[in-house]
């Protein structure tokens, strides 16, 4: 498998329009046999579509920690990737179980407003 193949993927946050008060966080990774695995958590809060919120991720060689509005809400030490990765921001529509089907009740256009993104690397 190429070192740029999927997985790995770290979802800093995903929010479904079906449950706007729930944020999901997932680490997708592969094992030695190339099987896709994941570990994930969820946090229930206020309706995330009503205001700006801070979503953060701390990733080091031994663990990944997720934060919502500066509160740690999930942590894993399983399947930690050691590759460079890309930041991707998207609004996904549809998706079956997670987001539901797009139909005439789907609010369109749909947007995600981002105020800023910061990336830091610890000094060694």
Image (cartoon, helix red, strand yellow):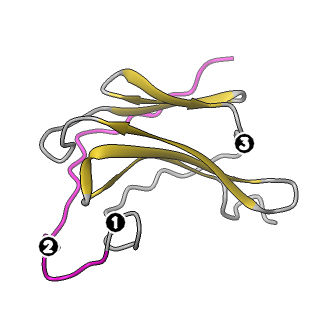
| x, y percent for residue 37 | 69, 55
Closest to the camera, between mark 3 and mark 1, is: 1
- Tell me the magenta residue range: 101-124
| Tag 2 secondary structure | loop
Label 3, label 2: how far apart the Cα atoms are: 37 Å
Q: Is residue 59 visible?
A: no
Extreme residue toward the right, this view = 33
The label on residue 99 is: 1
Q: Name above or below for residue 13 compared with residue 67.
A: below
Tell which of 41 and 13 is nearer to you: 41
Is residue 57 a member of the stretch shown in magenta?
no
The label on residue 34 is: none
The residue that disc 3 covers is 79
Question: Which mark sits nearer the N-terminus, 2 or 1?
Answer: 1
Main SS, magenta residues:
loop
The label on residue 108 is: 2
| x, y percent for residue 59 | 59, 31
């Amino acid at each position: 498998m190429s070192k740029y193949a999927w997985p790995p993927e770290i979802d800093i946050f995903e929010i479904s329009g079906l449950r706007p008060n729930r944020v999901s966080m997932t680490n997708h990774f592969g094992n030695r046999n190339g099987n896709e695995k994941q570990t994930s958590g969820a946090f229930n809060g206020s309706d995330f579509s009503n205001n700006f919120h801070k979503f953060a991720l701390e990733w080091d060689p031994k663990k990944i920690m997720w934060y919502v509005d500066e509160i740690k809400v999930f942590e894993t030490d399983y399947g930690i990737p050691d590759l460079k990765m890309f930041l991707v921001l998207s609004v996904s529509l549809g998706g079956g179980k997670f987001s539901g089907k797009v139909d005439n009740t789907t609010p369109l256009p749909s947007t995600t407003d981002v105020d800023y993104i910061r990336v830091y690397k610890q000094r060694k």
